[in-house]
Image (cartoon, helix red, strand yellow):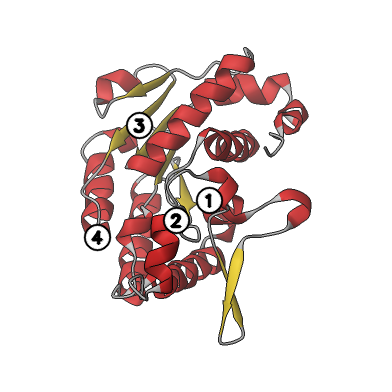
Amino acid sequence: MLALPYQQLDEISPAQWTALAGKRIFFGHKSVGQNIIEGLQDVMGSHPQLMLDIRETTDAKDLAKPVFAHASLGMNKAPLIKITAFRELLEGGLGDHLDIAFLKLCFVDIDHTTDIEELFVRYSEAVHFLNARFPRLKIVTFTVPLLSEPIGLKERAKKLLGRLPWEQADNMKRNLYNDKLRAAFKDSLFDLAAYESAGPAGKRSHFVKDGKTYDLLNKAYTNDGGHLNRTGRQIVAIELLKRLAAL
C-alpha cells in the first residue's frame, strides 16, 4: 500500500486554512468528482483544522456563507453539455457569490472519436467569458482523468484477444487534450491526470506509442480501472487542498 502524503498538509499555515474555510467554492463533476469529495471528507476526518462546509447544492442561497458546494452537472459522454451547464449555472446566479469554481470532465467524455480541438476551443471560450463576466472569480482548470491498464483476469483476456482495440487510443486523446490545458491554463491548473499517474519516487504509470509517452491512471489508485479507490481519492484530495490553499 502506498503511503499517503499527509505530512504535506503541515506546510499549509493556520492562516491559509482559515482563509480557505472562508471561501465560497463550487465544484461541478460526475463520478470521479464524487470520489474526490469523498477523499476530502476522508482527509477532514483526520485533520480537524480543515473546516470546509461541504454540501451538494446549486442554490445561490446556500452561498450566503462560506461553503464548498458541489453538484453533478450534465451527462457523461457529452462534455460540451457539461461545459454549457457549468457556464449557465454561474451566469444564473452562482457566479456573483463565488470566490472559486471548477468543472471536472470525466474520462468517458473523451475517447478516440473526440474532436479535442473543438472541445478545447469551447472550454476555453467558456472560461474566458466567465473570467470577464465575474472578474473576482477564480476558475481552476482540471485536467481530464485517465484510465489504467486493464484490471482483472477477464479484462486481461479481452486485451489479449484484441477486444479492447481503442483503450490506448482513448487515453492518447485524453493526454493530448490535457497537454493543451497545461499550455493554456498553467497559472490556474489543477493537474488531476498528473496526480493520478504519479507513483513512489516520481515514477509515473505510462505507455509508449510511436516514441511518445502517455500517462495512465496508477493501478494502485483504482479498483476498476477508472474510479478512484480510497488511496487514490485521498492523494488527489490532499493535492487539491494544497492547490486551493495556495490561491
User: Residue at (59%, 55%) from the top-left corner?
Assistant: 197
Q: Are marks 4 and 3 in contact (CB under 8 Å)?
A: no
Q: Distance between the residues labelled 2 and 1?
A: 28 Å
| 187, above or below 221, in the image | below
Q: Residue 3: which quarter of the image? A: top right
Q: Nearer the viewer, mark 2 or mark 4?
A: 2
Give how far across and how far down residue 221 sits, in percent.
Answer: 55, 44
Q: Is residue 137 left or right of residue 212?
A: left
Q: Look at label 4 and name its amino acid.
A: Leu
Q: How far apart are marks 2 and 3 (CA)?
A: 36 Å
Query: Which residue is labeled 3 in the image?
Result: 70
Query: Which residue is labeled 2 in the image?
Result: 153
User: Residue at (30%, 33%) from the top-left corner?
Assistant: 71
Q: Which of 173 and 244 is in front in this view?
A: 173
Q: Look at label 3 and name its amino acid.
A: His
* The C terminus - image quarter: top right
Q: Distance between the residues labelled 2 and 4?
A: 35 Å
Q: Nearer the viewer, residue 234 or 91?
A: 234
Q: Earlier in the sequence, mark 3 or mark 1?
A: 3
Disc 2: CA contacts within 10 A as few (<14), some (14-19) or many (>=20): few
Q: Look at label 2 and name its amino acid.
A: Leu
Query: Which residue is labeled 4 in the image?
Result: 80
Disc 3: CA contacts within 10 A as few (<14), some (14-19) or many (>=20): many
Q: Nearer the viewer, mark 3 or mark 1?
A: 1
Q: How far apart are marks 4 and 3 (CA)?
A: 19 Å
Q: Which of marks 2 and 4 is nearer the N terminus?
A: 4
Q: Nearer the viewer, mark 2 or mark 1?
A: 2
